[in-house]
Each structure stands twice: as C-alpha cells, then as structure tokens.
Amino acid sequence: MTAPLVQLQDISKSYRRGTQIVPVLTNISMAIESGEFLGLMGPSGSGKSTLLNLIAGIDQPDSGRLEVAGIDIGGLSEARLADWRASNVGFIFQFYNLMPVLTAFENVELPLLLTPLTRRQRREHVEAALALVGLDDRKTHYPNELSGGQQQRVAIARALISDPHLIVADEPTGDLDRESAEDVLRLMQTLNADLGKTIIMVTHDARAASHAHAIMHLEKGELSAREENFRP
C-alpha cells in the first residue's frame, strides 16, 4: 500500500502568552491520503489554523512527528523548510493576500520569479493557470478591479502555479457571498477530481465542508473521528 501523503503522530503545539504556556494541540495523530479533499472544522480557538500551518510547514510542532510526502518536515531547518514549502504547498487564504499594485497576471507569476524558468515559460504557466480558473480575460486587471470571487480565483491560480502536492485553504470562502463561495468550492472540487490535488480546507461553514470528501472536527486541541461525506 502507498503511504499517506500527510502523516501526523502525537503532534503537540503550545504558545507562550506572557509567562503562561497555552496548549493549542495535544497529541494529534492523523493520516491524509494523496488525492483527498479534507475539511477541518471547529470553533474559534480550537487549533484549526494552527494544525493547518503545521502541515503546511509555516510553523513547527513542539513534539511528535510530521511527515509530508515521506519527508519529516518537523526536522527541517528554516531555510530548507522555506524551499520545501515553495515546491510542495499551495496556499489559499480568506482575504486573498494579493498585491494591490500588481495585476492578476503579476500576482500569479510571483512564486515563479524565484525559479529558473524563462520569462516565456513563466508567461505560459501563468496564462494556463488563469485559464484553468476562468480568468484568462482578466489577467491585466488589478485586484480592486475584480470581485471577491475573482480575487479568490486569482489566489487559487497562484496556489497552483508551482504544481504543488498539497493545497491548504484557510477559510477560503469566509469573505465571499454565497454564490461566489459556491463557485470557488466547485473549482476546488475540480482541482481535486481532475488534477488530483490533495486539499485540506479549514472552515467553520458546514455548507463549505460538505464539498470535501470527509470532515474532521477540532475541539479544545483534540481531533475527532473522521466523518465521510457521502454523495448521491
């Protein structure tokens, strides 16, 4: 059998608040197979975003073992971790995190500027990514000229541009109206089904979570059993 893409074993994480140590995650163990679309739910302060940041290599655990694609990312140096993130993880955020002074094309191109690709190769990659999210006719538009749903699609194109193994999405529909949110969620399902992208999505919205293959809940730093989303 193929090993899971993501494996966590007894992961714990706490933060210091003044002189107090505040535990956030306690002995979390889970496995996520390649090609899954997993929803992570829980109340505010439950540790959802912390868990996502650990899996994405943005933060590191206090204890336990965390492997992604067979690499123990908890043991990497900051420099190696940054290189690993750039090659293996695509990020989608609630508030898009687009550069307002750059066009849609330039925002998507940003991660490629640190690669050895030529200008022509970068252009081909960016145009393909924007076409995939249905925005090839908006590439010269600035963020303030795009709707919230269009801005999130630009952010998704940027997340895809390095062809990552894993896409992590932190409340990707939290700032969108219902129709735009549905469009973004359907796009994420397409990326999962057609491109085989593994997606982990943090959300507080049960409607958004219903688009995932399965849901897991975090409550007071502890992870619940996996719930499958059955589809007709």
Image (cartoon, rainbow, N blue to C red):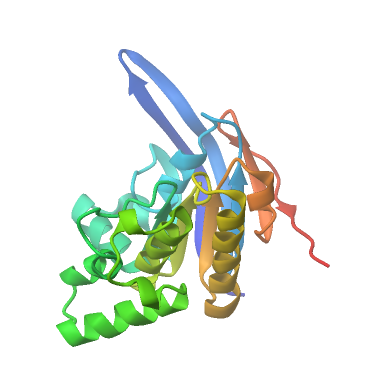
Decide: is 228 above or below 115: above
Q: Quadrant of residue 21?
A: top left
Does residue 119 appear left or right of residue 85 in this picture? left
Evaluate whether residue 181 shows in this view: yes
Residue 92 is situated, as x and y percent measured from the top left of the image, at: 42, 56
How many numbered markers are drawn? 0
Camera-side residue of 17 and 75:
17
Q: Residue at x 33, y 51 (%)?
A: 97
Does residue 73 appear left or right of residue 82 in this picture? right
Q: Residue at x 54, y 37 (%)?
A: 27
Query: What residue occupies the far top of the structure in this picture?
Result: 19
Decide: is 127 above or below 86: below
Residue 40 is situated, as x and y percent measured from the top left of the image, at: 59, 47
Camera-side residue of 129 and 112:
129
Decide: is 20 above or below 59: above
Evaluate whether residue 31 shows in this view: no
Camera-side residue of 190 and 74:
190
Q: Which residue is drawn at 53% across and 50% down?
A: 173
Q: In which quarter of the image is residue 15?
A: top left
In the rendered image, which quarter contains the N terminus? bottom right
In the rendered image, which quarter contains the C terminus? bottom right
Q: Residue at x 58, y 51 (%)?
A: 30
Residue 55 is situated, as x and y percent measured from the top left of the image, at: 44, 52
Residue 39 is situated, as x and y percent measured from the top left of the image, at: 61, 52
Query: What residue occupies the far right of the structure in this picture?
Result: 232
